[in-house]
Amino acid sequence: MTKLYATQAEKEADRPESTGKVSCLGPEGSYSQLASEILCKGYEIVLCRNFREAVSKLLDGETDYAVLPVENSLNGGVLPVLDLLAEADIFGDEEYMLKIDHRLAMREGTDPKDIDTVCSNEQALGQCLEYLQKNFPAAVYLATSSTTESLKRLNRHTAGIVGAHVKQEGVVLSPENIADVKQNFTRFLRFSKGQPSLDRRSAMIFLCAVCAHRPGELLGMLKIFQRYGLNLTRIDSRPLKDSFGQYRFFIEFTGDVSSDRVRSALAEIKIYCGQYRLIGAYM
């Protein structure tokens, strides 16, 4: 079972320090940066403009790892990342569940009564909607590329939503988490380039596959998991870009990728499906 850490310090205590480079979504202070500091302790952080750039730097050899969010406990799969994982030759070897702690950010001296705009990324705005409607019912909600991007827009009429870990001179954060649901976690995976040897232990396995577009094909694939006694923990679907009405399924299940049982199941799924990719195996 995945161990949950409430703070970076708890996770860092369990991880040895190393050296290298890791790419992730920026800007400075993003949740992705925080997760990267935990998953790649001691590594130089390369902040990127988007997820695709983070993956490209890994594939081009500019970084040793890329850290990407794959799922949020409230919003489900991170769809742009899932689309990248279907095509990129990368492999997830470790996961981390980061607790999300949203705080309202304002310039020092700002009167909350003067706020007419609140900005942050779309997920953060949605996760704090009850608080915003109660405290800023007339405000406009403006989506930005990331939570920390909203810091650039702060003025006496504009507030933002950022992580509790963000520190910036002249910016005051609310004393409490403003999210509607306080128990909010985002799952991050650490990715390396290529497909490593599977002579490794794992607790979880993540793959994507495309079934033939015929009645019962998805059921047939799921019966393979059932036959081998493998427990699915999540399943997402994404449309195929070049085939309207057809979908790629992203499936995570519990299992040790080094075991004969799991390997036999994966071999059957690979033969059964027209398209198949093993995305990760991790503890």
Image (cartoon, grey):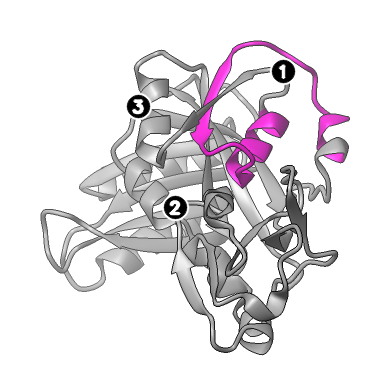
- Secondary structure beneath label 2: loop
Q: Secondary structure beneath disc 3?
A: helix
Quickly name the residue at label 2.
145
* Callout 2 crowding tier (Cα within 10 Å): few <14, some 14–19, many ≥20: some
Closer to the camera in the image, 37 or 141: 141
- Relative placement, left or right, of 92 versus 110 is left
Name the residue that disc number 1 marks: 42
Alpha-carbon span between mark 1 and mark 2: 27 Å
Q: Would you place residue 277 above or below residue 76 in this image?
A: above
Residue marked by disc 3: 56
Q: Give the amino acid at mark 2.
A: Ser
- Tell me residue 252's x, y (percent): 51, 52
* In front: label 3 or label 2: 2
- Name the image quarter holding residue 59: top left
- Toward the viewer: 254 or 64? 64
**In the image, residue 66 above or below residue 2:** above
10 Å crowding of disc 1: few (<14), some (14-19), many (20+): some
Please determine whether, in this image, residue 60 is positioned above or below residue 226: above
